[in-house]
Image: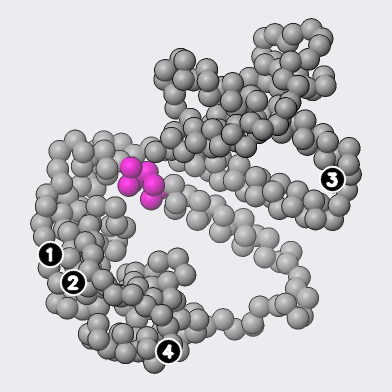
Amino acid sequence: MKSSRGLAVVAVSALALAGCRLPWVGGGKAPTGQVVATVGGEEITVRELNAELAGVNLPDPKTRKLAEQAALRNIIARTILAKAAVDQGVDKTPDFALQKQRAMQGLLVQTLQNKVVASVPPATRDEAEAFVAAHPDIFAERKIFVVNQIRSARPADAATMQAFEPLKTMEEVAAQLDKDHLAYQKGVANFDAIGADPKMVDAIVKLPPNEIFIIPNGDGLIFNQIQQTQVVPFTGEPAIQYALKVITRERTQDALNRQFSEILAKAKGQVVFNKDYAPPKTVTSATPPKPS
């Protein structure tokens, strides 16, 4: 899926520039070695070309060559148009300065994140086997829950959230949402333990019968009530490979949370707010109606 998306990006970029009549072939000495092209003396290297194709997996040489040519045309066009923007003074505008700062900060954070991710050791097969044994509800006794659902917007304040805590039926949930003027949709869905957070699965199987549980979903909430539970075992090598991915993902997320939290905590004293934009002195966190 990732490679298809990468190829699509290259294709769309090439298509967007297809109507431009660009000077693809110029004078001067042809570049060699690690330089794939030059634009007004500015070199475009193999490294830049590979970066343009990052995430594109094309084992077929002919297809790979076509993708490289499309990517190179994209780099050349971008280089020419960027130079034209500079010539017209676009880089001197306040809007550009702000966008450049945001883009640079985002790139630096992403690069730092990639550095942390690269330092995380991959899970071992022994760890995966132990993980499979420790989570029977995902593997040997894999659960697929048939659930009634209500999807709604997330209430903005803690008091509204707390109103859902004592509710026992989906009808009561719908009535409360109506009372709070929150739009919602009803439906029935399958909730597979495969793909879910293992901690969430552990919590769900321990719930009393017909208990409503809530799953945050972006800016919304999903209220769930289990109607039926199916057992479809997930075992063998596919289970081991899945466990390896889950362990590595959890380990990576823990490393990112730990290191980023440490960095933010150390820099806390450097932040000074305008009094009109300062956060409240006391922050009261809302308690979700049910643990997810």
Q: Are marks 2 and 1 in contact (CB under 8 Å)?
A: yes
Question: Which residue is located at x 59 percent, y 83 percent?
Answer: 282
Q: Are marks 1 and 4 in contact (CB under 8 Å)?
A: no
Question: Which residue is located at x 46 percent, y 20 percent?
Answer: 63
The residue that disc 3 covers is: 91
Above or below, comparing residue 133 to residue 240 in the picture? below
Q: Main secondary structure of the magenta part?
A: helix
In the image, is residue 140 part of the stretch drawn in magenta? no
User: Mark 2 to mark 3: distance in Å?
Assistant: 57 Å
In the image, is residue 246 part of the stretch drawn in magenta? yes
Which of disc 3 and disc 2 is earlier in sequence? 3
Q: Give me the disc on residue 282.
A: none
Q: Looking at this view, is 78 or 237 the one in front?
A: 78
Q: Nearer the viewer, mark 2 or mark 4?
A: 4
Identified by mark 3, the residue type is: Asp
Expressed as whole percent of the image width and height from the top left, the position of residue 169 reads 22, 85
Identified by mark 2, the residue type is: Ile
User: Mark 3 to mark 4: distance in Å?
Assistant: 48 Å
Q: Which secondary structure lies at badge 3?
A: helix
The residue that disc 4 covers is: 180
The residue that disc 2 covers is: 226
Residue interval drawn in magenta: 245-251
